[in-house]
Amino acid sequence: MLALHDIHWSTPEGVPILKGLDLEIGDRGLAVITGPNGGGKTTLAKLVAGLIHPDSGRILLDGEDITDLDVTERARKGISYAFQQPVRFKGLTVRDLLCLGSGRQLDEKDVCSLLSKVGLCAKDYKDREVNASLSGGEIKRIEIASVLARQSRLVIFDEPEAGIDLWSFNGLIEAFEEMKRSHDASEVIISHQERILAVADRIIVVEGGKVVKDGPREEVLPTLATISPCPMGRDAITGVRL
């Protein structure tokens, strides 16, 4: 279990973003962190991954204090972070990337299995370079396959829907649903997209630097419109105001 206790963090200019945030993330399930822009969602994700460190407070993993560990050290402990814009690697094939993610040489069956879980045909993708020839939706699904290959215990996705078209978004939803079925770990998605919220087991609302709502999807989702009436904007896919 990951636990964050009384977390405070401010920008280099001294603007407070997280203000005594407390949160626990269990060992399994898909949680979506949502809330208004500027409320602290992405800051929270980067703190969990070790990309930044809190000004005060503690982060514990199974009771071990990991507050001062960097992103590489946390990755060794099973925490993975997927960026909004995945990195592209000229000269590296999709198969190579999956092997790097798993830390071993994968056979044909393993590669095909991982790609099929994210809705991609292995024959069409396994030997393609991870470069600009891939669309935003394709590269994000390949990144999810790489996460599955790593078998991380906790995976964080920061607004995975950003910059992709409707067709790719549909594939992304299918990939997250497959992760729920096949990944024996905990997934955290930063998003306010209605269809991503709809596949969550748990919804966590972060606003004003704190967790203001946390619970099962069926309890939290109907209340979202009353938490922050306008800053969350419209869902880019559905047009629904959240």
Image: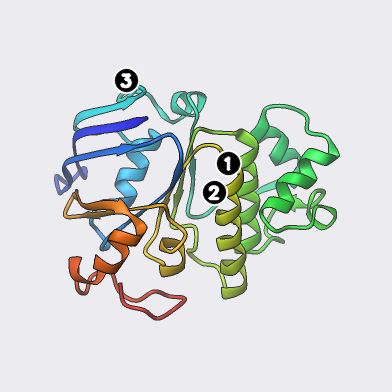
What amino acid type should be assigned to the residue bearing mark 2?
Lys
The first of marks 3 and 1 along the sequence is: 3
Residue on which the image places disc 2: 180
User: In front: 64, or 158?
Assistant: 64
Residue 207 % position (x, y): 20, 56
Select label 2 or label 3 by which is in front: 2
View extreme (bottom): residue: 239
The first of marks 2 and 3 along the sequence is: 3
**Mark 1 element type:** loop
Instruction: Say if 204 sits above or below 186 in the image.
Output: below
Cβ–Cβ under 8 Å for marks 3 and 1: no
Residue 221 % position (x, y): 32, 64
* Mark seen at residue 183: 1
**Mark 3 element type:** loop
From the image, which quarter does the C terminus lie in? Answer: bottom left
Cβ–Cβ under 8 Å for marks 1 and 2: yes
**Mark 1 vs mark 2, CA separation in Å:** 6 Å
From the image, which quarter does the N terminus lie in? Answer: top left
Badge 1: residue crowd in 10 Å (few <14, some 14–19, many ≥20): some
**Mark 3 vs mark 1, CA separation in Å:** 23 Å
* Mark seen at residue 63: 3
Q: Residue at x 61, y 34 (%)?
A: 150
User: In front: 184, or 80?
Assistant: 184
